[in-house]
Image (cartoon, rainbow, N blue to C red):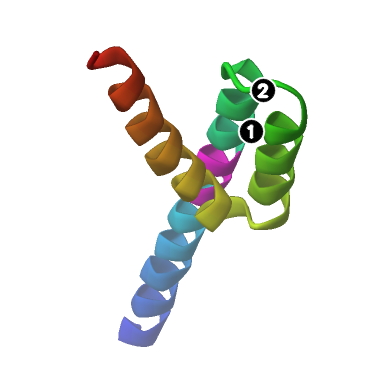
Amino acid sequence: MELKTDFALGFFIWQFALLMFTILWIYGIVKVMRGTLQGNKKLGWLLIVVLIPVLGSVLYLIIERGRNVKLTSH
């Protein structure tokens, strides 16, 4: 009985992680599309986010946040 419970919990954790990664991936795509980047930069970031889903989204959010902070701090 304990093995069945452990399996169900592990399966739930994997499903939850997959859901969170999917939400992060979609959020990254939306942020790139609505961002202030133009032309090739937007296309490049979009390709990175689409082809490397979780890592691409995290990189975009970190790098663009840093860029926006530098632009608004002047």
The prevailing secondary structure element of the residues shown in magenta is helix
> On screen, 66 above or below 16?
above
Neighbour tally class for label 1: few under 14, some 14-19, many 20 plus, Cα within 10 Å: many
Image location (x, y in percent) of residue 4: 42, 79
Assess whether residue 5 is covered by the magenta stretch: no
The residue at the far front in this view is 74
Labelled disc at residue 33: 2
* Magenta span of residues: 21-25
From where the camera sits, is residue 4 visible?
yes
Name the residue tied to disc 1. 29
Q: Residue at x 57, y 16 (%)?
A: 36
Judged left or right of residue 63, residue 47 is right
Judged left or right of residue 21, residue 43 is right
SS for tag 1?
helix
Q: Residue at x 76, y 25 (%)?
A: 39
Q: Are marks 2 and 1 in contact (CB under 8 Å)?
A: yes
From where the camera sits, is residue 20 visible?
no
Q: CA distance from mark 2 to mark 1?
A: 6 Å
Amino acid type at circle 1 is Ile
